[in-house]
Image (tube, helix red, strand yellow):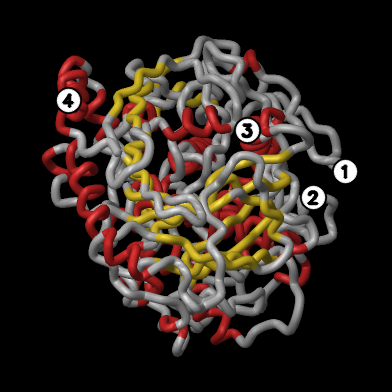
Amino acid sequence: MAAATSSSSNSLLSALDRDPRTDLRLGRARIQFGGRSGKRLCTTTIKCVHEGEEHARRSGRTSDVNRREFVLGSIGGGAAATLPVAGALANPVELGSFSSCSPAELPPGATPVNCCPPPNSSPIVDFQYNTRLPSRLRRPAHLLRPDEIARYNRAYQLMRALPASDPRRFSQQANVHCAYCNDSFRQANSRSELQIHDSWLFLPWHRWYLYFHERILGKLLGDDTFALPFWNWDNQAAGSPLANVIPSAYLNQAPLIDSLRNQQHLPPRLVDLNYSGQDSGPIPPDSTQRAENNALMFQQIVSGARTPSLFFGQAYRAGDANAPGGGTLENAPHGTVHVWTGSAAAPNREDMGTLYSAARDPIFFAHHGNIDRLWVVWKTLPGGRRRDPTDTDWLDAKFLFYDENSQLVRVRVRDALTTEQLGYSYQDTGDAWASARPTIVAGARNLVSNAAVDSPAVAAAAGDDDDDGIEEFGEATEGRVKKLEDVFKSKVKRPIKEDLAKIKEKLRIGKKEEEEDDEEEEVLVIQGVEIDCDRATKFDVYINLPGADENTSCNVAEYAGTFVNVPHFGDRRGGPGHMRTTDLRLGISDTLDQLGIKDARNIVVTLVPRGVGRLDPIKFKGFKIEYE
Ligand code: C2O
């Protein structure tokens, strides 16, 4: 058993001294805990924070990046843990030009479309702030006054009327989204595809996309104060007009209407932020729907999103396999609202329900206005580490957009960290969900053994076999894949207190001074989730609620989050067909706290497939606990 780590830590630290970049990476170190089923083994690894590369390695390809590894030793036995420090060179994702564009990969039944933007006629310029612009206030779509609706309507009329070759034309604007999602672009200096969903690029890319879209509309109107409205679906207030229905502007104004929407979901039907992808059973009473929407928001933005990587999604660097995993907001409500809005009668739930066509519906831009607003709100919430990533591979990621003058502009993530920098802000509409903490299902907390365990000896005496009859599925192991055809439950082992203290100590090693007070977050990893990219897949996760099934609400304290796939083609690299493999990472510290099981030796995790997931099974490989 490799006992602690002083000598190896020392060599680690001296190596770090030589590399000024590594402190950054270590600042985001992650520690994983796990034992193999049936064995009392606790191996702790400080994992390389180069998550994207980790993903690439899992998917069997090598990254463009050089890698060095430092042996750190392990805690509590098992093999030596390694700390691969990769990416000593900066490796942000970049789109270098539009000339690499190839036809988008479209789903069956889609009308062929060329999503590539028109070629640029003048050289690309770097983005510069336009300080002469008046500031713009983005307002909730349901509260727009008639004059605002008329202006909004006119802007889209003008945009739709531009010549087909104009990059600012509405259809071209919609195609930008298609090209960035459905495999049209290659990264600069690489043959890797560029995908802006299911990773930490999701929020900043969409912020930039909306920025230019809004500027183009303003330019067409000759009105620099023009601001896009946002669809305030998170606002569950019951007064009229309702915020959490499709706002009337999108139903009554020709340039804003889209016929490809789910006809069962028109007003007065309330948005279901936790939509399963299927309308089965009776429509819940409005009060129930509102409570569920608030609970979903609370879980995804407050409770389960206490660190940057949980909220923004996984790191995605140059050359990485794409779609390493989206953040909480991207999964739901972002993904669920897409699927809820698209037409159930269209072959691929066009328009909103599949990524190649989503931006053909003007409501897309209002939906993403709200997503963008929630990024702002998230940073103001108490508890956890609610700040933007500081990793330069995120900050220096670069994209290209045509601006309001049809000039092709290169933008960086770091230039869009606040909306004020870009000249706009959001009207405050209150965020009632931020305090909508659900309550515990009566009696559930006693369903499994929750005894706190203080030392390996006590753990050994306690044994693994609680009499709850729920087996431990364990960590991913070679060659084992589980089909999630029905509800699945497993015991998941947590580190004993003594090891937890050591894990915390290790996490502290790499922290920057200002991060020293940060509390570590416990992360439940559902490993190797494999889905068909083209299906609207969803499953929900509950802790210590073994009786959970497809009828169980998200409005319970045991709800720990959800996995949602908005259908899209484009993961050629994902394997045969259009399969995508990813880890679902759920921050569970707050949930464990709320359930009063912070010191529990085991938890029971229940996975509940919903909607089409039941017909077209999701697969996964195992469970793991990590800390970050
Ligand atoms: Cu780029 Cu809401 O998807």
Check disc 1 and give the amino acid type.
Gly
Badge nearest the viewer, 3 or 4 = 4
The image quadrant that residue 462 belongs to is: bottom left
Check disc 3 and give the amino acid type.
Val
- Residue 154 visible within the image: no
Q: CA distance from mark 3 to mark 4?
A: 45 Å
Q: Position of residue 324 (x, y in %)?
A: 53, 38
Are circles 1 and 2 on residues that touch, CB within 8 Å?
yes
Residue at mark 4: 13
Are circles 3 and 4 on residues that touch, CB within 8 Å?
no
Residue at mark 3: 176
Q: Residue furthest left?
A: 513
The image quadrant that residue 342 belongs to is: bottom right
Left or right: 251 in relation to 528: right
Badge nearest the viewer, 2 or 4 = 4
Residue at mark 1: 109
Q: CA distance from mark 1 to mark 2?
A: 8 Å
